Image: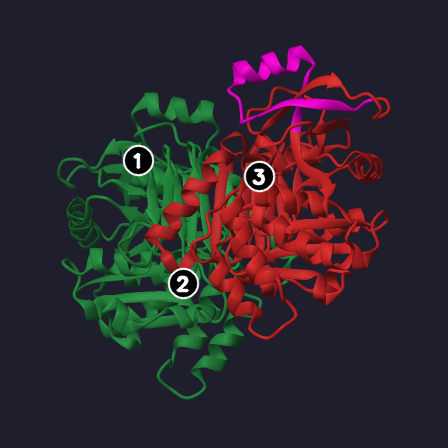
Chain colours: A red, B green
């Protein structure tokens, strides 16, 4: 069977003041379609039965998580004691899935990315499930780059993969976020894709690679999940996570694995990494507002208020966000600096961050 | 004796969101020296004994008025049922003052203007008291204009006033706010002064001119205040104000009076009419903040928060004000539009204006 693993353990403050220490981006309603995690689950539902959709999040996130709200069985929500990046998170879900279905193929996806064209997303995923099942390989979804973005990792393709049908390639390498010059070169070459963070693989294969590439993490987790139904599981999991290193699937597994495939895709993907990319996803040519907002003679303004009213006069390409007791004002192109400001607020006014 | 009448009945929304329907500018702490009305009283105290300082405000303002906070006797705070502009307000105070002291000279001053050099202000006022007492004339304080402001009324001087000492002129005429071209001409001529709104006159003379120039208003008020100590005064005052026209001292009296004097003065006066003029008064070359504010790479920003925190990144010449549930963002040079926005908020979100 096909399963999906929604990775919702991320944390961050790039969407301050809406994202805070206690509420991460995946739980924000940024695009107006509900919390990003709910949008992610909804995007999967026509393809993966709800009982096969799993969510991995942090214990700290449980106030924001509702199985009923997401439309998945309560037992499919797995809580990590602390975030250790994606490799352990996927392993936790893969172990549960494999126990239920030894032949399962999993599609792992971030909970906090936006997809404009959900049908195309599902087509790519369907193709990925088939390929991963038939070949036993890791399959990634690469996004045809629209511009030389420096905020994304890239996947370089190698030779076409024979027997994968049209439009499937072997991965030559994964790259970190490039500088602008390199990103331009990537774009010109036509061989590079944005790394969407979505990958598919048999659950059993994933466990095998954990054992091979990350043996200490693997052993700690195996011990903890062996009898996950039994009493004391939560304590065992806490012990397993204590002292466990943080390691991503990309760094810990994919960069060491041979024969990975990439399916070049286009489904209006955006990782929504900053207020700027949210506005770009929704269209910077227009004013985008949420809550009670009055704009007079503004262009390209992103203005969001969770209560009260915000009035903006005569501003262009500006971000104004009010949440609870905090207000942010910045030019859109400086959204990258929000993370640093959130840290400064946390330092100077600990009660307000 | 010399008396001062602080006119605190004004209302307006040019300082939205800090000024609201229920709290006018004179009760805001704009310059960091406390509410403007308290600053106004403090400026007078070295010159006028506290028992001779009178405050005229609206009944709606009483929550913001504390005789103890202002340092004046409680009986010196006079509440009008409704605002009817300055002529009736001064008349109300003048009647009370004259009853206590038939020879009193009053200095009437707005409660919500800023003065950078209080000592020079008092010198001008001292000179004004002497002149008004000796000549029986109205005496105004004119401000030597620093630039061709279009937001102020102007006083044109005529001939020097003989016997007034150096630096006293007859007033040729009062003008409304000019357009820029006219204001430039005023400035070049050297004969025009900004109208500070401060004037001095014997209390008895003021009553006489009310009777001559505004007889219906005069009669209504005289009937009400005749026995102001007695029971039912408040009801009589309410009846007097019902149907009374709004009329300013400038329009109702000064423009009709002959032989008014003007003392050209320089005491760093600013009527603080908008967020822009507040910032100009405090110095636009620097960032001016109030409350918990974090600025990153900002220039000429005016940022005020009554609670929580405001973070601003990379903005220039911007005004950001948060008060209660409302947030304002605008370029400084568009502060004039705040009044209109406040009205729009009132219309669209009545609970929040």
Residue A145 shows in the view: no
Which is closer to the viewer, label 3 or label 1?
3
Q: Residue at x 46, y 33 (%)?
A: B333
Q: Which residue is mark 1?
A: B286
**Callout 3: SS:** helix
Residue carrying label 2: B89
Q: Which residues are magenta?
A: A167-194
Q: Earlier in the sequence, mark 1 or mark 2?
A: 2
Say which of A342 and A203 sits in front: A203
Question: Which image quadrant is residue A276 in?
Answer: top right
Residue B198, percent from left and from top: 30, 49
Marks 1 and 2: same chain?
A: yes
Label 2 close to label 3 by CB (< 8 Å):
no
Q: Which of labels 1 and 2 is toward the front?
A: 1
Dot 2 crowding, Cα within 10 Å, few <14, some 14–19, many 20+: many
Residue B169 position in % (x across, y down): 24, 36
Of residues A3 and B167, the one nearer the viewer is: A3
Q: Which residue is mark 3?
A: A275
Chain under numbered label 3: A
Work out which residue is located at the far bottom of the displayed protein and give it: B231
């Amino acid at each position: 069977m096909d399963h999906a693993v929604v990775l919702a353990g991320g944390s961050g403050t790039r969407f301050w003041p809406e994202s805070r220490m206690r509420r991460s981006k995946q739980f924000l309603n940024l695009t107006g379609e509900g919390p990003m995690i709910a949008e992610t689950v909804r995007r999967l539902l026509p393809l993966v039965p709800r009982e096969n959709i799993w969510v991995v999040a942090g214990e700290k996130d449980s106030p924001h998580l509702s199985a009923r709200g997401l439309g998945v069985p309560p037992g499919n929500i797995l809580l990590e004691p602390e975030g250790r990046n994606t490799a352990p998170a996927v392993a936790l879900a893969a172990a549960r899935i494999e126990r239920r279905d030894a032949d399962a193929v999993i599609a792992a996806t971030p909970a906090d990315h936006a997809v404009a064209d959900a049908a195309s997303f599902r087509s790519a995923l369907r193709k990925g499930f088939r390929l991963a099942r038939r070949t036993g390989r890791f399959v990634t979804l690469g996004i045809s780059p629209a511009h030389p973005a420096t905020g994304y990792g890239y996947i370089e393709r190698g030779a076409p993969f024979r027997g994968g049908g049209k439009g499937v390639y072997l991965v030559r390498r994964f790259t970190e976020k490039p500088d602008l010059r390199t990103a331009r070169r990537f774009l010109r070459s036509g061989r590079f894709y944005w790394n969407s963070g979505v990958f598919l693989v048999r659950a059993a294969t994933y466990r095998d690679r954990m054992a091979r590439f990350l043996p200490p993490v693997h052993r700690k987790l195996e011990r903890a999940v062996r009898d996950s139904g039994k009493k004391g599981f939560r304590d065992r999991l806490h012990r397993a996570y204590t002292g466990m290193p943080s390691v991503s699937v990309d760094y810990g597994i994919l960069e060491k694995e041979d024969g990975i495939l990439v399916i070049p895709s286009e489904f209006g993907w955006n990782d929504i990494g900053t207020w700027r990319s949210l506005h770009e996803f929704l269209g910077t040519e227009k004013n985008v507002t949420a809550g009670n907002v009055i704009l007079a003679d503004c262009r390209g303004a992103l203005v969001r208020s969770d209560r009260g009213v915000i009035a903006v006069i005569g501003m262009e390409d500006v971000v104004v966000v009010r949440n609870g007791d905090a207000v942010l004002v910045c030019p859109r192109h400086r959204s990258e600096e929000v993370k640093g400001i959130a840290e400064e607020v946390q330092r100077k006014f600990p009660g307000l961050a």
